[in-house]
Image (cartoon, rainbow, N blue to C red):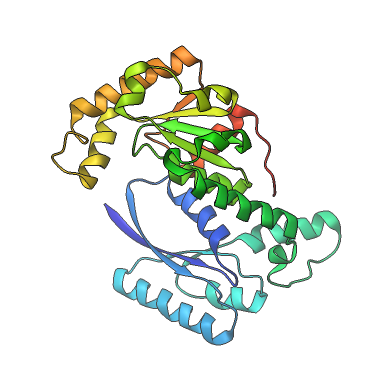
Amino acid sequence: MQERSVFFVSDQTGITIEAVGRSLISQFDQVHFIGNRAPYIDTDEKVQTICQQIQQAYDESQTAPLVFSSIIDAQHRQMIAESPCVFMDIFADYLVRLEQEFGCPGIGKTGRLHGMFDSTKYMSRIEAVDFVLGHDDGLNTHNYNAADLILLGVSRSGKTPTCLYLAMQFGLRAANYPFTEDDERYLSLNEDLKKCRDKCFGLVIDPQRLHEIRSERRPNSTYASMAQCRQEINRLLVLYEHEKIPYLNSTNFSIEEIATQILARKGMAQRFE
């Protein structure tokens, strides 16, 4: 398998350009990518340092690194583009086209996305994260009426990280409820869940994958055994069907993909952009 260095370079946090870059390179599973994050590259000195790192990566591999950039300063972009790399610039590719469309130049300032800050939406996000933490793993089920969404599933099926992502990205108050052996034995929802059935969404995971995840946590335990994992998932599927709860198999999806599918299937609008 070939290897290729990848640089995600930005004059801000770099979160956006890294997400874009990783989405693109994920299409090439025959290549092993070595990622390098470079946020806040906003001075000549920092740009020169990155150029040296790119040059070093090239010298070591004799292969041009990939560089995904969201740097807005044209001179800094040019300095990096002249390095021995495959340079992909989100501003050069899209900003020029937008300038042509609008008939006016962009203002050329960094941090503009941060400048679009909305304090109300920000506080909504903070409150949503607090809600998730206070209603994680079956806590405070009596307060489920205040939830926007209740994720159901067995232990280690991705409930908590999905709830946190929904809170941080979409401002949704997401609770999660773990089904234990006692819950599954009766194949029914408890009273708190029954009152909020329309807010419920289920997660399942392939038994083999569940076995692998649990084995890392508690190796050679009944909890992690293949038989236990298979039994829990089978019972949960019966429960979802019996209670008419929509569900998703999360085995082959990232947290971002799980959250997006849940929102689409539940018809839930984002609370902030």
The answer to whether any part of residue 7 appears in the image is yes
Residue 173 location in percent, x, y? 59, 42
133 or 29: nearer the eye? 133
The answer to whether any part of residue 118 appears in the image is no
Q: Quadrant of residue 64?
A: bottom left
Q: Residue at x 48, y 42 (%)?
A: 162
107 over 179 or under it: above or below: below
Q: Residue at x 37, y 22 (%)?
A: 236
Q: Is residue 73 left or right of residue 69?
A: right
As drawn, the residue found furthest toward the top would be 242
216 or 23: nearer the eye? 216
Residue 252 location in percent, x, y? 38, 35
Q: Is residue 215 left or right of residue 118?
A: left
Residue 147 location in percent, x, y? 60, 37
Q: Is residue 5 left or right of residue 141?
A: left
201 over 176 or under it: above or below: above
User: How many numbered markers are drawn?
Assistant: 0
Residue 273 location in percent, x, y? 69, 49
186 over 63 or under it: above or below: above
As drawn, the residue found furthest toward the left would be 220
Q: Quadrant of residue 53?
A: bottom left
As drawn, the residue found furthest toward the right would be 103
Q: Residue at x 54, y 53 (%)?
A: 20
3 over 108 or under it: above or below: above
